[in-house]
Amino acid sequence: MKRKTALVTGSTSGIGLGIATRFAEQGMNVILNGFGDAREIESLRTGFASKHGIEARYDAADLSRQDQIEAMMAKALREFGAVDILVNNAGIQHVAPVEEFPVDKWNAIIAINLTASFHTIRLALPAMKAKQWGRIINIASAHALVASPFKSAYVAAKHGIAGLTKTVALEAAEHGITMNAICPGYVWTPLVQKQIPDTAKARGITEEQVINDVLLHAQPTKKFVQIDEVAALAAFLASDAAASITGGILPIEGGWTAQ
Ligand code: NAD
């Protein structure tokens, strides 16, 4: 995978950071994206470049903004010629009953968790087609397959990503390009930690009950999925060995959706 270029959206934290780290270790050039402390992000970027001898870049694009996504993709294509591996990972969550769901939160979740991927995909595909090689990996969720109450926007966006994945996989299949959705169960990241107080409020239970009776209850393994496990699946999908896996909606959720 040396000298291939990977763009991982939302890679300053959690799952995206795990995937970007794995790709850098494999010798890919990596473009980081996401919010966070500027000094920490810069030391992450320089660490990637010096430890692994790769080109590591950072783009601060806000993925709720079409103009900023377009600028990020144009810069990546100008500097690297193609985004060989595109990982649509950036995401946010909000937990509330639908009749109380803040309209601005609905709009932000649909923009970041769904529409941003439409933009990155449509802008990445021409260069992938020119090279007759590409990998698009969408970090969806078990919530692309099943619902939970109080997560209407998130579940709608993630089901949407599943549909987008299948559609574009068909359009790109004859060009050496695969597109799959990884569907993790609960992974212990800031996104999950931040939703615990609101879930406790919406369900009228304690935060400890949220962890044991809602989150871990969903997963027969009774364990959180590990970031490294998701990164390993992404690395496999990015490899040549996964050339025939496309249009897949792939659960990695401790058996949640088998029930
Ligand atoms: P996280 O909060 O640790 O990371 C989210 C990343 O997205 C951060 O880098 C953040 O800066 C970035 N981001 C948020 N809004 C952005 C914006 N407007 N523009 C650019 N970047 C933005 O969360 P995570 O748990 O690692 O989530 C990553 C993905 O995995 C999300 O799509 C999430 O839905 C999905 N997922 C997470 C879990 C889980 O249990 N943690 C389960 C299933 C799916």
Image (cartoon, rainbow, N blue to C red):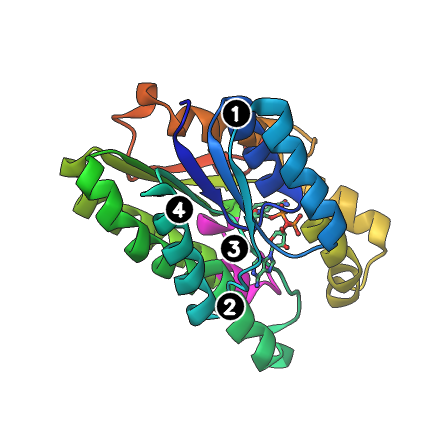
Residue 147, disc: 3
Check contact, mark 1 vs mark 4: CB within 8 A.
no
Q: What is the distance, in whole Å, between disc 3 and disc 1 at their CAs?
A: 26 Å
Dot 2 or dot 3: first in sequence order is 2
Report the magenta residues as a range. 143-155
Q: What is the distance, in whole Å, between disc 1 and disc 2 at their CAs?
A: 28 Å
Residue at the (50%, 37%) spot, across then down: 30
Q: Amino acid at mark 2?
A: Ser
Q: On the image, numbered disc 4 is attached to which residue?
A: 79
Q: What is the distance, in whole Å, between disc 4 and disc 3 at their CAs?
A: 40 Å
Q: Is residue 145 magenta?
A: yes
Image location (x, y in percent) of residue 76: 41, 49
Image location (x, y in percent) of residue 28: 46, 29
Q: Callout 3: helix, strand or loop?
A: loop
Q: Callout 1: helix, strand or loop?
A: helix
Residue at the (60%, 73%) spot, across then down: 105
Dot 2 or dot 4: first in sequence order is 2
Q: On the image, numbered disc 2 is attached to which residue?
A: 64
Q: How many marks?
A: 4
Q: Amino acid at mark 3?
A: Ala
Residue at the (27%, 25%) spot, across then down: 243
Mark 2: few/some/many CA within 10 Å (<14, 14-19, 20+): some
Dot 3 or dot 1: first in sequence order is 3
